[in-house]
Image (cartoon, rainbow, N blue to C red):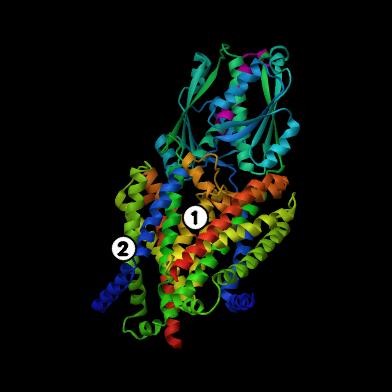
Amino acid sequence: MRSLRFLLQKEFRQIFRNPAILRMMFIMPVIQLIILPQVADYEIRNVNITVIDQDHSTYSREMIRKITSSGSFLLSGYHDNYKAALEDVEHDRSDIILEIPAGFERTLVRENEAKLFVAVNAINGMRANLGAAYLNTILRDYNQEVRTQWIRFPKFDEIPRVEVMPRNWYNLHMNYKLFMVPGILVVLLTMIGAFLTALNIVKEKEVGTIEQINVTPIRKHHFILGKLIPFWVMGMIVLTLGLIISRIFYGIIPVGNIGLIYLFASVFLLAVLGLGLLISTIAQTQQQAMLIAFFLMMIFILMGGLYTSIDSMPKWAQVVTWFNPVTYFIEVMRMVVLKGSGLNDIARHLGIIGIFAVVLNGWAVMSYRKRT
Amino acid sequence: MKEQFLAFVKKEWFHIWRDKKTLFILFGLPIVQIFIFGFALTNEIKNSRIAIVDLSRDASSQSLIQRIEASRYFDIEEQLSGADQADAAFKRGLIKLVVVIPENFGENIKHQNKVQVQIIADASDPNTGTTLTNYIQAITGDFQNDINEGKKLPYTIIPEIRMLYNPQLKGAYNFVPGVMAMVLMLVCTLMTSIAIVREKETGTMEVLLVSPLQPVLVILAKSTPYLLLSAINIASILLLSVFVLGLPITGSIVLLVLLSLLFTVTSLSLGMLISSITASQQTAMLISLMGLFLPTLMLSGFMFPIENMPPPLQFMSNLVPAKWYYYIVKAVMIKGVGISIIWKEVVVLLVMTIAYLTLSIKKYNIRLATT
């Protein structure tokens, strides 16, 4: 036990002696947590539209007015041929082209049916879908107006209507930040934990000090604990800082019990530190450790359910996310912070992350032994 | 001078080439990432698990539920007996939405001409919440049209919609250029970020400083082998995108490759800059990962639309090299446009590269002056 205490003293001293690492641990996450959630807004508004009006009729003008005054569209160009309009799209100035063919009004009135041509930049499928849907709604409303204008009697109320009454729970004002801040905090915590432990131990390997430790009578598990505990403490401090920032900058006060977040985080950090440990036993140089950590971190973050929906992924990718500790923590954060879920609700997550912690640390200790 | 330079490049090359494990990771990493993300990431929201409260249990409500179930957007996870159970279900975190069909649903459609369906969305994720609500609205709209079938409407405007560049609306068209920008940038920056600082740490920096090679050449010589490695990475990423993920290369492939090389040079120079201003490998790598990862991901425009960002952050996004490259890849690879449309982006990358290189040479020189 005494040797563990000395080891801890050494580790803490080493951490505090290096201002660069301290900055990286505390200031960088704080800055990122303050700045980055501002960016997270998927909402698609102000779709840029280019109009080609070859009809120049009352109807076409009225329709364009409806579109531009709807609030969803910005008129980014007004041309008389498709080629010029397409150039707008190529320059990324426009998302949608609406072409009103010559004789549109006449055809509509005489033949009861007239066509419009819409071309959508579909590189971002979601934006394309939504833009087209907005446009469709406006056109349908406009169509309705034209009809009531021509058919004087309002017979339309007699058609049975199914009304939808939407309600939004847990985030009444649809504030994206409530959703992103807890998630980003998890990501930052994961990065600090995994990167720092991975680098710390592999560095001892690279500079040779690990040999010295190996020849001293220090027990293996003391050595490992000596490495884990300081970073675990640092992680908990970063979590606390993060929660304070969420409160001050974003007014986020967990609906659920904050103790649950700490409970989960304490196990989660063990799992992540175990991962860092494992990486450092596999890697020979700091560069290798960093590349492996980067590789895993990118998968963890992009497939953690923070940016894209996990349900929408193909089955095999969903299976990959089962092995992603970040997924569980992000879910738990959102459950506790926004919905007020209790211990029963997160018990499964907690169990799984506990298994991660045991397996990763066990694996790391075993492969560490083999080496020496 | 030229011979010395080549000898130096050769030395660096052997240095890298000897370490097979690192090489293996360097080549394997981008391939696996493009593969996974190309298939897995999509902005679309589908197969969302929802719960149904059917208080009516008649033919009409059943037919509406079937419609919801049949769409690819929803999987019905459970049936609840009342709306009061919604909260508990949301807290377990298994479902995203509850559809409540009121009593006498079918009856009211026939006789009162108006019925209401209640939707409770878990808006803790606002994006999913809104999108799913929209989907349900569209489905009930279709359902309503079916009831009114046979009533042909006069004066109908028919919009014909064409999806340009990506007719099947595949997620990969958006995400592959984004992931390419991220992976290339981070891998390249990581590689060179330790190039100089490692010499400082191992003490060989002194040897470098007294060598007759000019600082600019030292820095170039250190980057050149990595440029060759990056070329292999670019080739493998492009091959994978085309042959495995089914993305087209609509524009000039030569232009695409050249600009990808330019972007790697930008990233390698950024790595060099980091390397010359830091004192330890650890700091260098933490800056290039902790410092660059999330900002690159979030500010390059492929995850979140830049026009939604607050103005100061829109400005910041201009400092992220990946933003410009993402735009270039989309334009050249998918839209098939030429240099006349993207020259501005190219100029920005060139300026960034020159700035990074100049700064790192300056820093290097300062060391030289003080020692």
Residue A245: x %, y % from top left? 69, 60
Q: Residues within 10 Å of mark 1 (few under 14, many from 20)?
A: some
Q: Is residue A221 left or right of residue A372?
A: right
* Left or right of residue B276, residue A255 in this image: right
Q: Are marks 2 and 1 on the same chain?
A: no
Q: Which residue lies at the image location 50% right of the left edge and 28% below the top edge?
A: A56
- SS type, badge 2: helix
At 40% across and 56% down in the image, what residue appears? B29
Q: Position of residue B287 (x, y in %)?
A: 51, 67
Up the image or down, A323 lies above or below A370; here it is: above
Q: Quadrant of the N terminus of chain A?
A: bottom right
Q: Position of residue A264 (x, y in %)?
A: 66, 55
Question: Residue B1 occupies which quadrant of the picture?
Answer: bottom left
Disc 1: which residue: A298
Q: Chain of mark 1?
A: A
Identity, as a three-letter code, of the amino acid under mark 1: Met
Asked whether B95 or B371 is in front, the reply is B95
Q: Chain ID for label 2?
A: B
- The label shown at residue B205 is none
Residue A136 highlighted magenta (yes or no):
yes
CA gap, disc 2 to disc 1?
24 Å
Mark 2 or 1, closer to the camera: 1
Instruction: Give B331 or A344, whichever is nearer the viewer.
Output: A344
Disc 2 marks a residue whose amino acid type is Leu
- Where is mark 2, residue-wise? B228
In the rendered view of the protein, which quadrant contains the C terminus of chain A?
bottom left
Q: Which residues are magenta?
A: A134-157
Any part of residue B348 in sight? no
- Where B10 falls versus A82 (above or below)? below
Pick the front one: B9 or A157: B9
